[in-house]
């Protein structure tokens, strides 16, 4: 397909940051952007790469060096890194917990401090009921949290000079950036798990129960964990590898004619040893992130100062409903 070339400038990254957008979102708003082609898999970035003869894959995949032959191409290299990292962050690994599985909703903000809201079900008369003509409806307490959520930066510094990577094919470099994105997502999962367990700073640590016999995971412990929920329905369990293995080896789980059991816990190294967390993933956590802008320091990429560039994202987590997660202590 043939695409119209959109003139690019460094100011477009500045504009994107000011508007809290990605460069791809700025390109999508341009009159020369082909919306029909996007429905066929040609993203704003891919369209502009194609317009400049830069292939992302195949035998004719561009070299990193090709991106530094014009000012336009340099900008697209920075956005290529951005997009590859984002794709890596969204990749799902079957046996591991993925970030999107943990988060009920995402909120983009313009700064690094967020005053979250909370609903107090335990101290509310939250059971709806019919009332008489002059009767009062039960109340639900909704309020701002006492302490704001502070966002933190997660990322990596690229330790490679331009000379070291200039002859690398862009498809190979993109795979590296996708893995880097996957690692950033893993680090964010660890932060999210810590908030589930210890709370978000507003005196809301996770509630827990103990196994019937310390050091041994039994079927009845799984049942007790699932039934510990009052207002919510557990939809996901996460645990360290040893606890996942112990679950997979339960006789009741291996017995095809045995009782119905929840899906095994997904692996999460951030969960402490001998513990399993169950949560209602649609109600437990809110992810808060600094909206828009580039994940990579585009000005350093453009200046070929790749060895100094950092790929990062600013985010944090707030508990929406503390009662939406519970923890089983197998060893206590």
Image: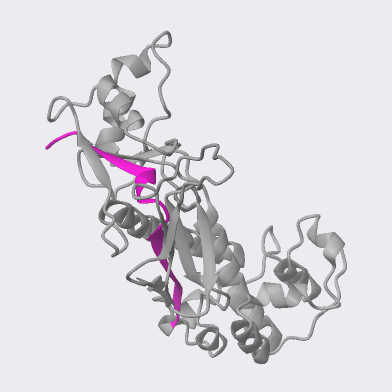
How far across and how far down the image is residue 166, in percent?
A: 54, 77
Q: Residue furthest top?
A: 257
Whether the magenta-drawn stretch holds residue 312 is answered as yes
Picture quarter with the N terminus? bottom right
Name which quarter of the figure residue 226 lies in. top left
How far across and how far down the image is residue 321, in percent?
A: 40, 51
Q: Does residue 313 sit above or below 305 in this rendering?
A: above
Question: Is residue 172 left or right of 139 when viewed as pictured?
Answer: right
Question: Is residue 100 left or right of 268 when viewed as pictured?
Answer: right
Question: Is residue 228 left or right of 286 when viewed as pictured?
Answer: left
Picture quarter with the C terminus? top left
Which residues make up the magenta segment?
309-332
**Viewer-nearest residue: 199 or 66:** 199
Q: Residue at x 57, y 64 (%)?
A: 84
**Viewer-nearest residue: 274 or 199:** 199
Whether the magenta-drawn stretch holds residue 195 is answered as no
How far across and how far down the image is residue 65, in percent?
A: 60, 79
How many badges with numbers are in the image? Answer: 0
Q: Residue at x 80, y 74 (%)?
A: 51
Q: Residue at x 12, y 30 (%)?
A: 214
Q: Residue at x 44, y 35 (%)?
A: 233
Q: Residue furthest front?
A: 134
How far across and how far down the image is residue 12, in percent?
A: 68, 86
Q: Main secondary structure of the magenta part?
A: strand
In this rendering, does residue 70 appear at all? Answer: no
Question: Is residue 184 left or right of 30 when viewed as pictured?
Answer: left
In this rendering, does residue 103 appear at all? Answer: yes
Q: Does residue 93 sit above or below 160 in this rendering?
A: above
């Amino acid at each position: 397909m043939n695409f119209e070339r959109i003139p690019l400038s460094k100011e477009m990254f500045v504009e994107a940051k000011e508007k809290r957008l990605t460069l791809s979102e700025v390109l999508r708003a341009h009159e020369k952007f082909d919306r029909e082609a996007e429905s066929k898999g040609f993203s704003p970035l891919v369209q502009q790469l194609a317009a400049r003869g830069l292939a992302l894959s195949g035998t004719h995949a561009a070299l990193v060096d090709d991106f530094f032959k014009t000012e336009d191409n340099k900008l697209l290299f920075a956005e290529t890194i951005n997009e590859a990292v984002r794709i890596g962050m969204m990749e799902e690994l079957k046996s591991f917990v993925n970030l999107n599985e943990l988060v009920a909703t995402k909120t983009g903000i313009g700064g690094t401090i967020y005053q979250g809201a909370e609903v107090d079900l335990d101290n509310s008369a939250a059971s709806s009921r019919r009332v008489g003509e002059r009767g009062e409806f039960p109340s639900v307490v909704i309020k701002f949290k006492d302490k704001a959520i502070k966002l933190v930066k997660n990322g990596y510094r690229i330790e490679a000079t331009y000379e070291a990577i200039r002859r690398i094919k862009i498809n190979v470099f993109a795979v590296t950036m996708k893995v880097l994105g996957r690692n950033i997502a893993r680090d964010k999962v660890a932060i999210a798990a810590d908030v589930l367990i210890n709370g978000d700073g507003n005196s809301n640590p996770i509630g827990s129960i103990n196994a019937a016999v310390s050091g041994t995971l039994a079927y009845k412990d799984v049942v007790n964990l699932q039934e510990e929920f009052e207002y919510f329905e557990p939809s996901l369990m996460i645990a360290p590898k040893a606890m996942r293995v112990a679950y997979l080896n339960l006789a009741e789980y291996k017995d095809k004619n045995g009782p119905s059991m929840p899906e095994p816990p997904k692996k999460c190294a951030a969960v402490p040893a001998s513990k399993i967390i169950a949560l209602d993933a649609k109600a437990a956590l809110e992810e808060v992130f600094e909206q828009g802008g580039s994940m990579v320091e585009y000005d350093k990429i453009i200046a070929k100062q790749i060895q100094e560039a950092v790929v990062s994202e600013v985010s944090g987590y707030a508990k929406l409903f503390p009662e939406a997660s519970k923890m089983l202590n197998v060893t206590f």
